[in-house]
Image (tube, rainbow, N blue to C red):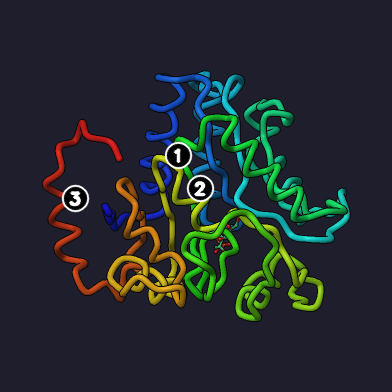
């Protein structure tokens, strides 16, 4: 696992560099998309590169990590609508090529199985962007999730509902109780995992992710088993890392030409 301690704007450039390299090498690559605050700077950087340098998403496919269950199709916080507004529409990416778990399906288990099938038929995810919850979730795999879980319905932890109330006028009761999320096993099959975290409130989760024992209690620790995982954190999110100086030295000594 590579840990890079850098301000958010540099994190965004590094992650966007990796995505740009992928798309320029293989235009039909498959990207894994996260929502929430963490990837916003990366999306801003990708929009900039689309507008200024002609970075094209036209032949790529996207798969979202998760979706709330039960939010009406036109709800502004439905993740499909959020990602359209924050990235897809702004890089002129055909929405039909960007897929998400169906939080409105009549038969959710069947829709989850179809989603897994769609990812497999696309050849798997080349690069998966991730944020991390304060309780250590990735996707919406809350503490206690099986480390080999697949796409399924989950109950959001009270901590996550309270963290996400900021997107629902500060009213926790408006935050759905259930979600559909790619499982930890599903996420782990992506060829490159790129996790972004900033802020002191993420410091304990980041410490556990990088340095804690692998445990369902901190679901993101499953990333320790991944052969190509990159963790981009700002100083505040890195503030509980025991080996922070070592990560800094390692990154400082990395050849400039080598990407993530
Ligand atoms: C969202 C997702 C979640 C978030 C996490 C952090 O699609 O999968 O795991 O990445 O809850 O959220 P933010 O970035 O808003 O702090």
Observer-side mark, 2 or 3, equals 3
Coordinates of residue 135 in the picture (x, y in percent): 51, 75
Q: Work out whether residue 75 or residue 181 is closer to the camera in this orientation and state it.
A: 181
- Whichever of callouts 2 and 1 sits on the residue coming sooner in the sequence is 2
Q: CA distance from mark 2 to mark 3?
A: 21 Å
Q: CA distance from mark 2 to mark 1?
A: 17 Å
Q: Are marks 2 and 1 in contact (CB under 8 Å)?
A: no
Observer-side mark, 2 or 1, equals 1
Q: Work out whether residue 74 or residue 67 is closer to the camera in this orientation and state it.
A: 67
What kind of element bears circle 2? helix
Q: Name the image quarter holding the N terminus.
A: bottom left
What kind of element bears circle 1? strand
Q: Which residue is mark 2?
A: 41
- Per the rendering, the mark at residue 127 is 1
Asked if 6 appears above or below 48 in the picture, the reply is below
- Whichever of callouts 2 and 3 sits on the residue coming sooner in the sequence is 2
Q: Residue at x 54, y 69 (%)?
A: 145
Q: Are marks 2 and 3 in contact (CB under 8 Å)?
A: no
- Per the rendering, the mark at residue 251 is 3
- Whichever of callouts 3 and 1 sits on the residue coming sooner in the sequence is 1
Coordinates of residue 147 in the picture (x, y in percent): 46, 64
Q: Residue at x 67, y 35 (%)?
A: 98
Q: Quadrant of residue 75?
A: bottom right
Q: Are marks 3 and 1 in contact (CB under 8 Å)?
A: no
Coordinates of residue 38 in the picture (x, y in percent): 52, 56
Q: Work out whether residue 251 or residue 181 is closer to the camera in this orientation and state it.
A: 181
Q: Quadrant of residue 254?
A: top left
Q: Name the image quarter holding the C terminus.
A: top left
Q: Residue at x 76, y 49 (%)?
A: 110
């Amino acid at each position: 696992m590579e840990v890079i301690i850098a301000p958010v704007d540099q994190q965004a450039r590094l992650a966007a560099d990796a995505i740009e390299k992928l798309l320029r090498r293989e235009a039909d690559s498959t990207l894994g998309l996260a929502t929430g605050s963490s990837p916003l700077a990366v999306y801003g950087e990708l929009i900039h590169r689309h507008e200024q340098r002609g970075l094209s998403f036209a032949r790529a496919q996207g798969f979202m990590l998760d979706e709330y269950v039960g939010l009406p199709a036109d709800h502004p916080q439905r993740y499909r609508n959020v990602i359209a507004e924050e990235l897809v529409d702004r890089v002129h990416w055909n929405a039909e090529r960007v897929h998400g778990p169906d939080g409105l399906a009549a038969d959710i288990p069947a829709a989850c199985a179809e989603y897994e099938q769609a990812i497999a038929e696309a050849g798997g995810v080349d690069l998966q962007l991730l944020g991390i919850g304060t309780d250590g979730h990735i996707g919406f795999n809350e503490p206690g999730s099986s480390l080999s879980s697949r796409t399924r319905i989950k109950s959001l932890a009270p901590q996550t509902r309270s963290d996400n109330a900021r997107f629902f006028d500060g009213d926790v009761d408006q935050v759905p109780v259930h979600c559909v999320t790619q499982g930890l096993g599903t996420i782990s099959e992506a060829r490159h995992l790129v996790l972004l975290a900033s802020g002191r409130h993420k410091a304990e989760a980041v410490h556990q992710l990088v340095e804690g024992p692998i445990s369902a209690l901190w679901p993101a620790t499953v990333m320790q088993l991944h052969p190509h995982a990159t963790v981009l954190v700002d100083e505040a999110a890195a503030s509980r890392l025991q080996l922070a100086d070592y990560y800094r030295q390692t990154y400082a000594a990395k050849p400039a030409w080598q990407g993530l």
